[in-house]
Image (cartoon, rainbow, N blue to C red):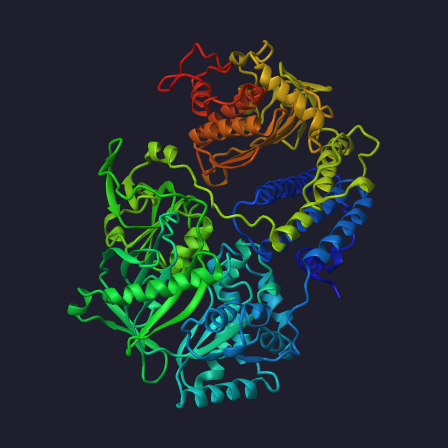
Amino acid sequence: MPNGVTRLLRKLFGLDQWRPVVARPDRRTALSLQYRLFKELITSNDEILELIAEVEQKLQGDGLFGMTYVRSRCVNAATHAYRMIQNINKLSSRRYQELYGAFNGIQARLERLIDRAPPPIGAPSVYPLSEVDLSLAERVGTKSANLGELRNRAKLPVPDGFAISTGAFLALVQAGQLRDEIRAREMGVELQDQQSLAAASASIREAILRAPLPAGLETSILGAYRELEERLGSAPRVSLRSSAVGEDTQTSFAGQYVSVLNVAEGQLLGAYREVLAGLYTPQAIYYRAVNGILEEDVPMGAACVAMVDALASGVAASADPSRPDSGTLVINGSWGLGVGTVGGCVSPDFWEVEKGAEPRILSLRLGTKEIRVDPLPQGGVGPSPVEPALRERPCLAEEQVLELARLVMAAEKHYGAALELEWALDRLGRFQLLQCRPLRLGANQGGSLRREAPEEVDGHPLLLTGAGASGGCRWGPVVLASSPEEPGFFPEGGVLVARHSSPEFVKILDRAAAVVTDVGGVTGHMASLAREFGVPAVLDTQKATALLRPGQVVTVDADHGAVYEGRVDSLLTDLSPRGIRRTIRGTPIYQVLQEAARLIVPLHLTDPRSPDFQPSSCRSFHDIARFIHEKAFEEMFRVSDQVADGEARAVRLEARLPFEVYLIDLGGGLAPSAEGGAVRAEEITSEPMRALLAGMTNPELRWWEPRAISVAGFVSVAAEALFSPHNDLGQRRLGDRSYAIVADAYCNFSSRIGYHFAAVDAYCSDSLHRNYVSFRFKGGAADEERRARRCAFIAEVLSRLDFQVERQGDLVNGRLRKFGKEILMDRLDQVGRLIIATRQLDMRMGPGTSVDWHASAFLSGNYLFDPAIRPEGAGREG
């Protein structure tokens, strides 16, 4: 039977495409087909390079990840490597069939590392909570396992109940023959199309809701309920909570699944089906997709616990998410059940408590607490207004806050890590813990931060203040949304402004620059998701939806809980991302990633002229991608020789550049007068290529003149060449060929200039929504520190040119989208200058070199980086 990676690849490409496919284009469509295949191939190559950089960053030991992360990165790498193999064979008439064998060998070794059998269906379907702890997480799901751990190992107060296994869910799917139907529905989903997502979700959930329970499961669930009734002395109302494998871990799934509260015995089986169907809510499907999580890895269990008749409820975090090193914990709470607090529809009370043997309340901020949620007599829960007098009172007395703080610290001590815990206070004054998960600290959280926001920054007035729930500083246009269903198409880089902080907004978090809400707390589901996605969030502002206008540009400074008018560059520059301080190095999961990385990351095929540069030498997915990337350009040249007269052909560019450039015209990229084996710059009609070339040939660059290079920089290059096993220095020389594929509105330029790789992909037209420029830069000859400093310089320049920039180590990705044609042409000119100006810059940028000064120098036209020329508004280089 096919295992995990194989199943996904067959799902992506189809069973008939699992074997090599021969492409038979006719002569009229040959080049357009080849171009499409080539473009797909280059896209997959970029994805693999990005994945490699990300895995290398994880292997530095910063941040936390689970097996889901390892598995998803292996699947992604295999998917893109396989797509590249398919496309290069279609491009070349099956010239590289050996690559399938190399792929299968690497894939088989990866599968042995990452595949595990699902929980056995024959195992017990129901476990009393008294028998559950973290060792059963695979069988009962993480939420049930954590509740059992708190109750049985940490000896903390948790309601009595039982866990329904993940194997019971797998048995239901198998008995109802639902797997094929679920996969068919998921295959048709367009993730960015909310109607498509909602339709697929509804269909799958309906199939689960009508599926019969397997023989014996109904009896086991009702039997466990009656045993609970005997222990409690009366028939209890219960809550059925989702408990999927991987839930409440570093991928929290906060608020993505379904819990059913206040359930009577007669409603129990229907509520259980609702929880199972919750695996396929629109937001859960989307969350798994954007996190690269296979549905097979997260089977659903359920935690069934006695309902707490709650006087007050909320969430506590054993560290302040905005200041994790402050030695404090925070508590949110409101009247009634905690649904309103965690769901973001209540403005809760907030306490900050100093941790220690004798905890001490440092501050209290009263929430408005306008509504409460309580159990209904017929089952379920409902909202009602809070009496005015109670709105003015904290929902916990001081001694209760301190008692809860001690419980939170005890849980943190038991787990040895920061936690978020849902809590409830019953009407007898007893606390119960209802949920436990790791406290997610986003990439922007770090040491102690200033708490006060200035009234004005560089002339930009302060518009709003609130609770900083996920740190960082970003800017963008305001996008108002009154409900999670409303955004539909949410623009990349928009600032989400909403009344409530609903976790259903997860469907747009990967596109949002920041989040601002009227209501919500720093320990709610939305706050956790914002930290998980690395999106700055300012919650509980009370009036954001009334004050901010659609399209209004604002800067969200979540480190200070502030929203400013316009783009405040000084904040965006000064408030750099703060890394997570924990490390996962040395854990079993880290070791699995380390082993998997050996089959993905290393590059052994460094020299295309070597006799070993062939498919049989590929020992990693990086090798496969490198080999195919090199051969793809050769195939495009071969195609240009095969098409009929009058169609595009391969030509050499005559221009004063430090490397040779060859062009392939897809149509409209070169003038009809361009004949023979060479073409001049003025014969290029591809507008983006003309702009890029204008930048690279700018006479002020004077690249042919000697550059000032420090002795230390030169020595670092020599040392890297001699001693780095991962570098291909000496295999690639300055002046090797560079390639450009051009059309009237398109260009794809790829070059190894010296010892680094640069690529530009651009489309410039009169259609604003189709326009983009992507720029990628990686590598260098100097040591890691100097390469990283040069990449920081490139990232700073791109950022000042309006690119959205991501940087990991010596890899920089910049993207500019949906700007007018003239702006994109100007930016391509600047990128062309940047490509040439950065030659050997890594050798120059030693310790003490100012990235900011170099960026200012470049943008002011000082392309030789002469320290005697001081850029306007910049300090001296040094």
Q: Position of residue 507 (x, y in %)?
A: 45, 56
The answer to whether residue 72 shows anywhere in this view is no
Name the residue rendered at 50%, 34% in the picture.
765
Can you name the residue that lies furthest to the left here? 389
The answer to whether residue 230 shows anywhere in this view is yes
| Rendered view: 11 above or below 768 | below
Q: Quadrant of the C terminus?
A: top left
Q: Position of residue 99 (x, y in %)?
A: 79, 45
Name the residue rendered at 58%, 61% in the picture.
188
| Rendered view: 801 above or below 401 | above
122 or 83, which is in the foreground? 122
Q: Quadrant of the N terminus?
A: bottom right
Q: Quadrant of residue 614?
A: top right
Name the residue rendered at 58%, 25% in the picture.
685
360 or 472, which is in the foreground? 360
Looking at the image, residue 118 sits to the left or right of residue 816; the answer is: right
Q: Position of residue 662 (x, y in %)?
A: 68, 24
519 or 824, which is in the foreground? 519
